[in-house]
């Protein structure tokens, strides 16, 4: 199973989530690759901690996402920070750049999962996930839900993983989000890994 994890991240929160997905899926034997969305306004901010600066440098070293990365994958996992209940402008620009794939129906039948980061539970993360899945549906991809049973006793949104950053720059991924990603990765691998 070949997996493309395409994300946009400004200060690293979504990068931490994307990296955790990649690490977990690779640990489970899937071929997962990270791709960052081009962000023309991306720059290193000198007042950030050294851990966050290291995180930003790690993102910069990743290949930029292209429509071809989606074509080459069996499963596409996309993540974006939540901006006013929607995806970020760079993620939307990337999504729009794949219009040629939509015209030819080239992503039809591929599986799709999503994640986001939001400042707080009222930050519109569920709407951002919905926007990502709406894109996938228009492209003919098959949405994979996050099972309600992923982690016992934890209420999860069906549309994917939401990492609540509480307005902080990323240094570490909280344990609850890490557990959700591990469980979702195992679910994806169990259900779909043997099909390809």
Image (cartoon, rainbow, N blue to C red):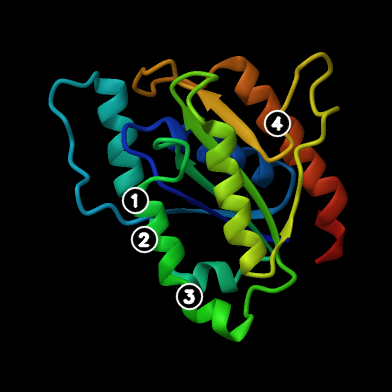
Q: Quadrant of the C terminus?
A: bottom right
Mark 2 Cα shell of 10 Å, populated few (<14), some (14-19), many (≥20)? some
Q: Residue furthest left?
A: 46
The disc label shown at residue 157, or none: 4
Q: Mark 2 to mark 4: distance in Å?
A: 25 Å
**Helix, strand or loop at disc 3?**
helix
Q: How many numbered markers are drawn?
A: 4
Q: Mark 3 to mark 4: distance in Å?
A: 28 Å
The disc label shown at residue 141, or none: none
Instruction: Tell me where residue 75 appears, x and y as whole percent.
Output: 68, 59
Dividing the picture into quadrants, the one containing residue 87 is top left
Q: Mark 3 to mark 1: distance in Å?
A: 16 Å
**Helix, strand or loop at disc 1?**
helix
Residues at marks 2 and 4 touching, judged by CB atoms closer than 8 Å: no
Mark 1 Cα shell of 10 Å, populated few (<14), some (14-19), many (≥20)? some
* In the rendered image, the vertical position of residue 62 relative to residue 45, given as above or below: below
Q: Mark 4 to mark 1: distance in Å?
A: 23 Å
Q: Earlier in the sequence, mark 4 or mark 1?
A: 1
Residue ID for mark 3: 99
At 56% from the left and 77% from the top, the residue drawn is 102
Q: Nearer the viewer, residue 108 or 177?
A: 108
* In the rendered image, the vertical position of residue 196 relative to residue 145, given as above or below: below
Q: Earlier in the sequence, mark 3 or mark 2?
A: 2
Q: Mark 3 to mark 2: distance in Å?
A: 10 Å
Residue ID for mark 2: 93
At 79% from the left and 22% from the top, the residue drawn is 151
Q: Earlier in the sequence, mark 3 or mark 1?
A: 1
Residues at marks 2 and 1 touching, judged by CB atoms closer than 8 Å: yes
The disc label shown at residue 89, or none: 1
């Amino acid at each position: 199973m070949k997996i493309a994890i395409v994300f946009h991240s400004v200060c690293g929160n979504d990068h931490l989530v994307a990296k955790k997905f990649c690490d977990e899926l690779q640990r489970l034997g899937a071929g997962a690759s990270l791709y960052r969305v081009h962000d023309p306004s991306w720059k290193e901010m000198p007042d950030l901690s050294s851990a966050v600066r290291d995180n930003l440098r790690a993102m910069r070293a990743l290949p930029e996402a292209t429509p071809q990365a989606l074509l080459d994958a069996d499963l596409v996992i996309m993540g974006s920070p939540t901006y006013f209940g929607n995806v970020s402008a760079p993620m939307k620009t990337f999504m729009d750049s794949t219009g040629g794939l939509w015209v030819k129906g080239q992503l039809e039948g591929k599986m799709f999962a999503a994640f986001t980061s939001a400042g707080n539970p009222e930050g519109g993360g569920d709407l951002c996930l919905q926007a990502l899945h709406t894109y996938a549906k228009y492209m003919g991809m098959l949405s994979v839900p996050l099972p309600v049973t992923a982690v016992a006793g934890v209420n999860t949104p069906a549309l994917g993983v939401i990492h609540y950053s509480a307005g902080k720059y990323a240094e570490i991924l909280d344990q609850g989000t890490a557990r959700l990603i591990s469980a979702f990765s195992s679910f994806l691998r169990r259900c779909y890994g043997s099909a390809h």
